[in-house]
């Protein structure tokens, strides 16, 4: 059983004869209370309650519980709950008190929480009202779509007009499947983009065609939390004229040509995140659908020591384009393909880079280069028996090293910084070796044809 925090023995007049405190209040010295009237230990507003409790105990044997503010000799004030009991033989009164500080604190916190909830409720109502006004008045087409079943939850008038929904608030405007408003050729890309948004919270926009005239729109989606589950916030904006060609509203023919191109085509942003890819790129990456690559970094598949995506993008940012950049594609199933990449940015400071990749794994080496290397090695072979093995190996290493340095300079178009990166050398080491092999004169290197 819980022990009382304060126990007092009073005589019939209400004078304290003995005072006992629990361990929680052991530091409070109450010896000075002995011999004083119990009512004198309270402020003026508490003494009346105490006198009433003493009178009730004398007349009925026990008083009701009353809450008062008790002042201890140290100056500490605590909310207490007391009851007074008449002892047998009318030998005195027993007072039992419980500390209500924890209860008072909980009550205070409860009141503060209730007030905060009320304030938050009205703030939320204000936000919802403003949201509703903005949502209805916005000129931008906005849809709220259930992420689980892709059914339309809400749509503003601009979205209803764009999708050809029934105007006004009539039945059948909401609850319909989103995919039914898009042509079959756009549904796969839309589902892939929404899958990407479901996984990462957002996804790059795609070009879709809606309405009876098949007008081109940019569709963007983001995943947000709602009650009872997740929803997609979808924005539709008319496509820019630059995206739909000179006077043509249907760009599907361009998309089909790029999609059927025998070389891989991919578009990335400045961080190397893929925005678009064609079927040939998916074959090189060994993935099943475009949704598996949209939003991923290209260097997940395109990389090679000294010839990675960062070098390629830096050259595009610096020079506007890059031609015949040789690197490696690593497929998801383990296939490694040598590719030749040409890239171009859209502006002086590109925010989008388009890359065309050609698989050159089975391309035959240049006969001229092979003949030169074979002839150089043949001359070393003829020295067997006349030159020690250590010297033969050293000479052969020098021939092969010079060959690869010439190849790197040709691949980089005599750009020595790029050649050093391709070879994994510092610029100082490259300059030293160029001087060693007599390649420091740029005119001695035949540039690569574009």
Image (spheres, rainbow, N blue to C red):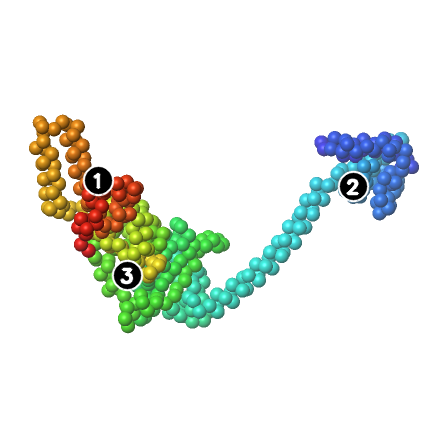
Q: Position of residue 187 (x, y in %)?
A: 31, 59
The residue tagged 2 is 77
* SS assignment at label 3: helix
Q: Is residue 291 visible?
A: no
Measure the C-alpha gap from mark 2 to mark 3: 78 Å
Question: Which residue position holds label 1?
Answer: 436
Q: Is residue 28 above or below residue 318?
A: above
User: Taking the image as drawn, is residue 117 in sight?
Assistant: yes
From what the image shows, is residue 423 above or below residue 206? above
Q: Earlier in the sequence, mark 2 or mark 1?
A: 2
Q: Horizontal and vertical percent for residue 340?
A: 22, 50
Assign the C terminus to one quadrant of the image: bottom left
Of marks 3 and 1, which one's residue comes earlier in the chain? Answer: 3
Quadrant for residue 305, please give it.
top left
> Considering depth in this image, is 403 or 321 the residue closer to the camera?
403
Q: CA distance from mark 3 to mark 1?
A: 60 Å
Residue at position x 69%, y 47% in the image = 108
Query: Could you say where residue 361 lies in the image, as x and y percent from the top left?
Result: 18, 46
Identify the residue at image location x=40%, y=70%: 161
At 20% across and 39% down in the image, what residue appears? 401
Q: Which residue is mark 3?
A: 185
Dot 3: within a 10 Å radius of its alpha carbon, few (fewer than 14), some, or many (20 or more) residues?
few
Q: Nearer the viewer, mark 2 or mark 1?
A: 1
């Amino acid at each position: 059983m819980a022990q009382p925090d304060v126990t007092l023995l009073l005589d019939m007049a209400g004078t304290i004869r003995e005072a006992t405190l629990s361990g929680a209040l052991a530091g409070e010295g109450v010896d000075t209370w002995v011999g004083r009237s119990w009512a004198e230990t309270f402020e003026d507003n508490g003494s009346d309650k105490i006198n009433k409790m003493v009178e009730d105990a004398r007349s009925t044997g026990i008083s009701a519980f009353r809450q008062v503010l008790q002042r201890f000799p140290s100056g500490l004030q605590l909310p207490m709950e007391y009851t007074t009991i008449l002892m047998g033989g009318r030998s005195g009164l027993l007072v039992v008190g419980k500390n209500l500080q924890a209860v008072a604190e909980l009550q205070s916190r409860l009141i503060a929480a209730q007030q905060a909830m009320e304030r938050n409720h009205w703030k939320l109502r204000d936000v919802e009202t403003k949201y509703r006004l903005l949502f209805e008045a916005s000129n931008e087409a906005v849809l709220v779509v259930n992420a689980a079943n892709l059914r339309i939850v809400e749509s503003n008038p601009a979205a209803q007009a764009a999708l050809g929904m029934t105007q006004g608030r009539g039945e059948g405007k909401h609850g319909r499947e989103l995919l039914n408003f898009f042509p079959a050729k756009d549904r796969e890309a839309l589902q892939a983009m929404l899958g990407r948004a479901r996984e990462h919270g957002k996804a790059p926009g795609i070009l879709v065609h809606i309405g009876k005239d098949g007008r081109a729109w940019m569709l963007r989606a983001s995943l947000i939390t709602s009650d009872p589950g997740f929803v997609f916030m979808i924005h539709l904006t008319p496509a820019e004229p630059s995206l739909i060609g000179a006077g043509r509203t249907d760009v599907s023919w361009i998309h089909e040509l790029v999609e059927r191109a025998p070389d891989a085509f991919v578009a990335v942003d400045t961080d190397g995140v893929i925005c678009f890819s064609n079927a040939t790129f998916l074959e090189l990456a060994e993935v099943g659908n475009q949704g598996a690559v949209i939003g991923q970094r290209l260097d997940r598949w395109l990389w090679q020591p000294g010839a990675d995506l960062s070098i390629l993008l830096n050259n595009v940012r610096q020079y506007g384009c890059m031609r015949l950049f040789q690197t490696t594609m690593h497929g998801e199933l383990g296939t490694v393909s040598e590719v030749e990449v040409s890239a171009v940015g859209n502006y002086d400071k590109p925010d989008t880079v388009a890359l065309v990749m050609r698989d050159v794994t089975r391309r035959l080496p240049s006969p001229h280069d092979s003949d030169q290397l074979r002839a150089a090695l043949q001359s070393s072979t003829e020295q067997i028996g006349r030159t020690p093995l250590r010297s033969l190996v050293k000479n052969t290493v020098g021939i092969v090293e010079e060959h690869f340095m010439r190849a790197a300079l040709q691949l980089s178009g005599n750009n020595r910084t790029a050649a050093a990166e391709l070879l994994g050398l510092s610029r100082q080491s490259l300059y030293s070796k160029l001087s060693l092999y007599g390649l420091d004169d740029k005119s001695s290197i035949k540039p690569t044809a574009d």
